[in-house]
Image (spheres, rainbow, N blue to C red):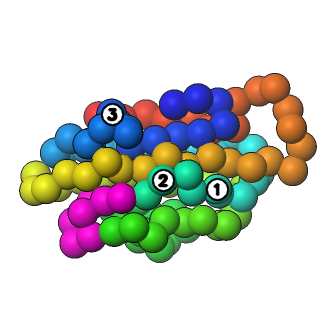
Amino acid sequence: MSGDCASSPNHPSDYGDGESCTITALRDGRLDVQAFNTESCCDHLAVGGQDYDGTTGPDGVTLVAGNNMQWSSDAGRTRSGWQICLDSPTALPNRRMRQSCH
């Protein structure tokens, strides 16, 4: 993960089975989906109470500082995953997201 962007583990290669990540917005901003490809039935990125899977990610969704995104994958098929950036209204040099995976 870079300061402005978060990605599924191992992106752009396939993510693994049984993954779980929490991504926290450190600033207000709008999500800009760079890539999104997950198993449509079973691997989800939850943002603001909405689950995203398949090839449709949370593009344009607004987060405020402290909001979380939750990633989880099951033990089935894997895909190339996702990369999502947080466009902040002010371009500051500090990180905009924090990611923790297990």
Q: Residues within 10 Å of mark 2 (few under 14, many from 20)?
A: some
Q: Is residue 59 left or right of residue 65?
A: left
C-alpha distance separating marks 1 and 2: 9 Å
Q: Give the image location of residue 74, x and y in percent.
A: 17, 55
Q: Is residue 87 left or right of residue 12?
A: right
From which residue to which does the magenta span run? 37-43
Q: Residue furthest left?
A: 76
Q: Residue furthest top?
A: 93
- The amino acid pointed to by label 1 is Asp
Is the stretch drawn in magenta largely helix, strand or loop? loop
Residue behind mark 1? 32
Q: Nearer the viewer, mark 1 or mark 2?
A: 2
Q: Residues within 10 Å of mark 1 (few under 14, many from 20)?
A: some
Q: Give the image location of residue 4, x and y in percent.
A: 66, 37
Secondary structure, mark 2, is: strand
Mark 3 / mark 2, whichever is N-terminal: 3
- The answer to which image quadrant residue 45 occupies is bottom left
Secondary structure, mark 3, is: loop
Residue 70 seen in the current view = no
Secondary structure, mark 1, is: strand
Label ID, residue 10? 3
Q: Give the image location of residue 77, x and y in percent.
A: 13, 56
Task: Indicate whether residue 40 is drawn in magenta.
Answer: yes
C-alpha distance separating marks 3 and 2: 13 Å
Q: Residues within 10 Å of mark 3 (few under 14, many from 20)?
A: few
Residue behind mark 2? 35
Q: For this rendering, which residue is in front, 88 or 68?
A: 88
Asked if residue 96 is positioned above or below residue 41 in the image, the reply reads: above
